[in-house]
Amino acid sequence: QTALLSILNFCSELQHLSLGSCVMIEDYDLIASMMGAKCKKLRSLDLWRCKNITESGIAELASGCRLLEELDLGWCPTLQSSTGCFTNLARKLPNLQKLFLTANRSVCDTDIEELAANCTHLRQLDILGTRMVSPASLRKLLESCKDLSLLDVSFCSQIDNRVVLELNASFPNVFIKKSFT
């Protein structure tokens, strides 16, 4: 963790960083804070399976890394929609093109609607496994995000085959991925 903090401190031109599944990092909030403070040119960040990043770290990251286009927060169990972390991301990162919220069961309609309102350049969204996203919010997203080409709603309990077929008919340029089992 100390070495990574030094790298972040001295590499202000850093544009791409993958920390996915790095189990040796003890405090992801500290890392996110340092990225927000020092890595203003960051464009893609992979935090897949970060075990301890919280809304505080995400807030500092989003405030400082406003150029982010790709962000992977899949399988981050400590991030909860109820804290406002995802709506904050949507409001502060309008350049997002790819967002992975894979297996975050707390993602809800409010989060999707904020993405629709603020992240209109979105090309790919993965919300696999969420239970609280409705067809209505997905429709808003698809109507607002004209560049969207891939939407993964696999294992989203409110999105059944009928909904996928209806959305496919209305938005034929978007591949809507749905795995049921």
Image (tube, rainbow, N blue to C red):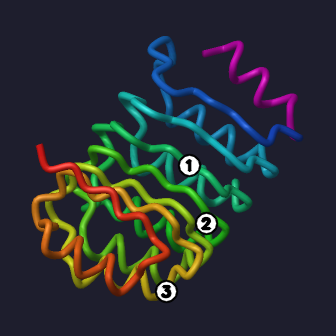
Q: Where is residue 100 in the image (x, y as percent from the top left)?
A: 44, 50
CA separation in Å, label 2 and label 1 = 10 Å
Q: Residue at x 33, y 57 (%)?
A: 177
- Residue 71 badge: 1
**Residue position marked by numbered label 2 in the rendering:** 93
Q: Which residue is drawn at 56% across and 37% down?
A: 46
Label 1 sits on a secondary structure element that is: strand
Label 2 sits on a secondary structure element that is: loop
On screen, residue 2 above or below 164: above
Give 114 or 126, whichever is nearer the viewer.
126
Q: What stretch is highlighted in magenta?
A: 1-12
**Label 2 packing within 10 angstroms: few (<14), some (14-19), many (20+):** many
Label 3 sits on a secondary structure element that is: helix
Give 169 or 56, whichever is nearer the viewer.
169
Upstream in sequence: badge 2 or badge 1: 1
The amino acid sitting under disc 1 is Leu
Q: Residue at x 35, y 56 (%)?
A: 152
The amino acid sitting under disc 2 is Leu
Q: In which quarter of the image is the C terminus?
A: top left
Mark nearer the viewer, 3 or 2:
3
Q: Do the residues labelled 3 and 2 touch (CB within 8 Å)?
A: no
CA separation in Å, label 1 and label 3 = 20 Å
Q: Position of residue 119 (x, y in %)?
A: 56, 74
- In the image, residue 19 lies in the stretch drawn in magenta: no
On screen, residue 83 above or below 26: below
CA separation in Å, label 3 and label 2 = 16 Å
**Residue position marked by numbered label 3 in the rendering:** 144
Give 148 or 4, whichever is nearer the viewer.
148
The amino acid sitting under disc 3 is Ser
- Residue 103 badge: none
On screen, residue 93 above or below 110: above
Upstream in sequence: badge 1 or badge 3: 1
